[in-house]
Amino acid sequence: MIRRSFLVSGAIAALVGPLISPAAATAAPVAPVDRREVGNLTLENVPQAPAAVREALRRYQNARSASFQTWLEDGSMLISTRFGQTAQLHRVAGPGADRTQLTFFDEPVAGAEGVPGSADRFVFTKDTGGDEYFQGYLSGLTGGETVFTEPGTRNQSLLFSKDGRTMAWARVGKGDPDYDIVTMTVGDPASRRTVFEGTGATAPVAWSPDGKTLLLGRYLSATSSKLYLLDLATGKAKEINPSKTEIAYDGGQFTPDGLSLLLTTDQGSDFKRLVQMDLASGRMTPVSPADLTWDIETFDLSPDGRILAYSVNEGGRSRVVVQDLKTRRALPQPQLPVGVLGALKFSPDGKSLAIGLNAATSPADVWVFRPESGELVRWTYSEAGGLDLTALSEPTLANFKSFDGLTVPAWVYRPARINGRAPVIIDIHGGPEGQDRPGFNSRRQYWAAELGAVTIAPNVRGSDGYGKTYIKLDNGPKRQDSVKDIGALLDWIATQPDLDKDRVVVYGGSYGGFMVLASLAAYSDRLAGAVDIVGISNFTTFLTNTEGYRRDLRRAEYGDERDPAMKKIFDQISPLNLTDRMKKPLFVIQGRNDPRVPWTEAEQIVSAVRGQGGEVWYMLAGDEGHGFRKKQNIDAQREAETMFFSKVFGR
């Protein structure tokens, strides 16, 4: 059971006190709080949803998806899907075959990789209660999983050598900003050893074919990263293509001869291109078209090095390209539905390409393409929970001009029919270097069909997918410009004949939660309400309290709170200092174990807004982290959101 004072605790009050706007000190007394506990949820001022709301949500909440995880040596695959409360691993032996469940945990499984050369062994990662301190497990198809990582550490980027005998991964401890690189003989935890002490967010990217070298990547920001070759015999790492200019890299694979690398980079371009780098000379040869004005989002090379597959992010939609690597000749292309890519991976024999894909009007599923024959076969058929897929809303792309003339794209989901003017939910993605893409989203479909609401999902400045110039437009002291994009969107909404400018709610999580709170402060007179999910309420306290392995990465994006000039800007723009301007109802949703945006960010904004006499609903989950992943909690969240929308929309 979660126990929490109605008022801010002493520790949090000490943290928050000096940062609250002066008006808060003279605000009206805090209104009584209606508090109840349901399982691991603590709810304040959240009314219980009637049976009719739960019934209307049921079909949308029971839709499920299939996410490709890995191939096994026998040509079967592992997928992740949910049949109970959490997503677990299942094996699929062939097209349309039964999904055989392999893991049965209360916590969701984060990801899996098959052991090369083994027909029945794989590894997977799992955390506890959303704390993101992932542990690694080795398992077989008949169970018997064994943990091979250390408690209290976060483990990620698990990679196998070509022969499947050795595994490498990145590991960091609590409060530590620096990842180490660890190797282990598969099945022998006693052989685990640190082979490189990294700096910052360093991780293995690829093994060389001979198993003697690891390609390492160090992520600095969305527009800056570095690559190194680690000699495992000496423990020495040599930087590839060192430069004083910011360069972003993604992915990386050795060619079978070990003489070159395939990787994506924005060097010399505003967009990420696929190139082949000769390791001896450092010369880069373009593989994707040099004049392409979209990012390459991912790629994979067949084990024999002959066939290359890559995906282009064309304004949010994915297009898969298959070609001969040596001749650059186009091979038969997969004729896929329009959608968003989730996975792209060749089978161990190189004859099949797994493609994870979802569209706005169908859940994510896995397709398999055979490049030699051009045959495309759907392997999984995820249930839509009783939804009529033909009746779902297909988003359209809109563009609006911001305060400085910048064109901002947005996806718009409209109900099938609008009588008069529809209420609007502005759904703002996180990141901030994320991108809203037109994939399957049962939440937005529910809002359209059952609430009659139009969802607008803007890709405000700072979003990924539109080039590095666009992604830098909100960095550091320019943060408030992205909030002004929401003001421009409100202007656009007011010009649309089918949208009700007086019934607009801002909704978002993580950085999107900050945008919600900042928009509520800036445009309270133009909003009906706001829903903040695991959002940043004060940049100084956020950067102070976020986990150590994230802190410097976030400083690269938001600015450094230790710099007095930046600290002054943070004090000016942080929502916690602007609560006297928040005049409309606010709903705050938070996971207690969130390592990214600590729960104190939610607690302090709830307390401060109530201190101003504002209306605040609050939902805290004791068994969740950065967003809810367990079905019972997600169901409760959707029910509560529906009640909030009904209140502020006047339904």
Image: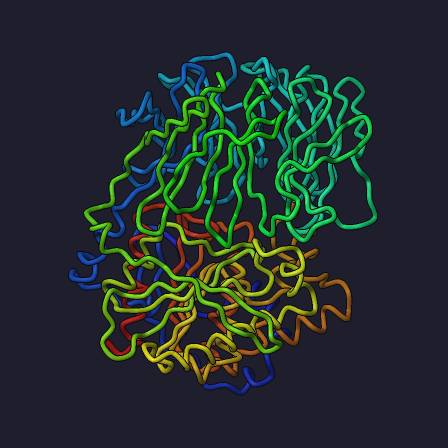
x 28%, y 38%: residue: 382
For this rendering, which residue is in front, 259 or 374?
A: 374
| Viewer can see residue 9 | no
Which one is in front, 604 or 68? 68
Question: From the viewer's perspective, is 629 left or right of 163?
Answer: left
Q: In the image, what residue occupies the spot 38% across and 20% down?
A: 76
**Can you say whether 370 is above or below 629 in the image?**
above
From this view, report whether residue 521 is shown above or below residue 643.
below
Location of residue 176 (image quadrant) = top right
Q: Is residue 458 something one can see in this rendering? A: yes
For the C terminus, the image quarter is bottom left
Q: Position of residue 187 (x, y in %)?
A: 54, 14
Q: Residue at x 60, y 52 (%)?
A: 293
Which of the pair 455/325 is nearer the observer? Answer: 325
Q: Is residue 498 left or right of residue 601?
A: left
* Percent of width and height locating residue 256: 64, 19
Counting from the top left corner in percent of width and height, residue 114 is at: 48, 21
Q: Is residue 273 left or right of residue 48?
A: right
